[in-house]
Amino acid sequence: MPVLRRKLYDVMLAWKQRSAGATALMIDGARRVGKSFLCGLFAKDEYKSHIIIDFGNISKDITDLFENESSDLDLFFTKLSLYYSVSLHKRESLIVFDEVQQFPRARQLIKYLVADGRYDYIETGSLIRLKKIVQEIIIPSEEEHVEMHPMDFEEFLWGLGDTVTVPLLREFYVSKKPLGQGLHRKVMNKFRQYMLIGGMPQAVLDYVQKLDFESADAVKRRIIKLYRDDVSKFAAGYEDKVIAMFDGIPAQLSKKEKRYRLSSISKQARFRSYEDSFIWLGEAMVTNNSYNTTDPSVGLALSADHATCKCYMADTGLLITHVFMDRPFIENELYKAILFNKLNINEGMATENIVAQMLRANGHKPYFYSRTDAINRQNHMQIDFLITEGNKIAPIEVKSGEYRSYKSLDKFTQKFKQTISSPYILYTKDIMKKDGIIHLPLYMTMFL
């Protein structure tokens, strides 16, 4: 069975070498994004021995050990070693707290375990930033925090055995020279597969082994069901609102402006009553929430209007499946539309979603710009994404099909010309510079 290579492995290795036991590593990511598997692989390859404590499926013996006997660490480690039948070696063993959000008491203990210094510690978690989960513990300052996202395009290509394409693409990106029709078409075909399958490791592995979209779609359906089950468990008290918002994401992204309009859920719905639902989906890393920044000249976060939000799925492959979740795979028109480059304005949701996903994986927190002027329509502007480049802001427009103009981009560039760097258009064609705008194929979002 092939092992999917992840870039986070190198981050973990750098932490091990740099920290030398002075900190624990906290890996935050959505469910089924590959945290547990990667930790197991890292522990096996980089340590003499390891223990993985799965707090999602743990015995009362271990919870009692944490609750009642953690004050005597000599006895604590002896019992832990005996329970898991693993010999622990000073500075050569790793203990993994997997799904630590299920047992916050263990996370609070990290402070004392790190101070003890005998072993290394990695924590993994989903929903770890929710107030409900951490309100009764003191968050240890000894944690180094990293996020784990779905597999990016390069990792997807690695899974297919392709280690050549992305380094080559980087050279074209730096030079801003076109790839040529043949090479561009070849890369776009692979990128369309990535859009459809997404970056959830179980779905990617299934596709790598079988090259079957329907089989991978079944894997994604199980992941979506798991997310819905998590809502019932971790969003108690407002789970109905979270589910309603989650189920409404495809319909919202199919609209031209793509901002989330609560009136589609209920005419009486107001942001203040659904704000926790937006936050929950974002903190669970199920969605990438993008907020309207009303004045980019003073900074993106400083002028963000949190009541005006776009709610992208964190994984585009899951979005493709989510759209037709209540119908058989064979009726999912998006697979055919994306593979054969027949996207219309509604199906263009996938292109904007994949850009949001790739920007987030690159460390960008996505924002957009939307201005409406009822008196003078010339002041209307809609910019899909804004990201920072150094001390400048780069506006990005996403085009899923043919287009004739970019009026909003021109107006935005003129209005904020002292603040912005190069504007970009991301589309399905080859690299091009035109009218001072850099046109990049969608797959080159990875380099922004």
Image (cartoon, rainbow, N blue to C red):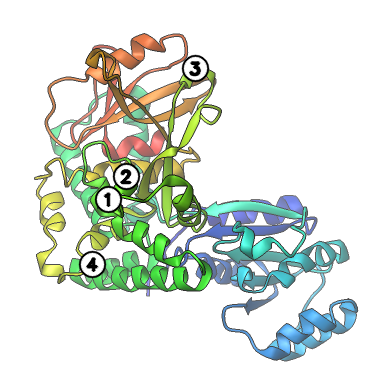
Mark in the foreground, 1 or 3: 1
Mark in the foreground, 4 or 1: 1
Answer few, some or many: residues within 10 Å of disc 2's Cα (few below 14, many 20 plus, some between 14 and 19). some
Q: Is residue 160 visible?
A: no
Mark in the foreground, 4 or 2: 2
Q: Which residue is mark 1?
A: 264
Q: Spatial distance from mark 2 to mark 1, Cα to Cα?
A: 6 Å
First in sequence: mark 4 or mark 1?
Answer: 1
Amino acid on which the number 1 mark rests in the picture: Ser
Picture quarter containing residue 266? bottom left
Q: Which residue is mark 3?
A: 297
- Location of residue 212 in the rendering, given as x and y in whole percent from the top left corner: 19, 69
Residue shown at 32% from the left, 67% from the top? 203
Picture quarter containing residue 180? top left
Tag 2 and tag 1, C-beta contact below 8 Å: yes
Q: Is residue 95 above or below residue 419?
A: below
Q: Spatial distance from mark 3 to mark 2, Cα to Cα?
A: 26 Å
Labelled disc at residue 261: 2
Amino acid on which the number 2 mark rests in the picture: Arg
Mark in the foreground, 3 or 2: 2
Q: Secondary structure at mark 1?
A: helix
Residue shown at 30% from the left, 13% from the top? 411
Residue shown at 70% from the left, 57% from the top? 16
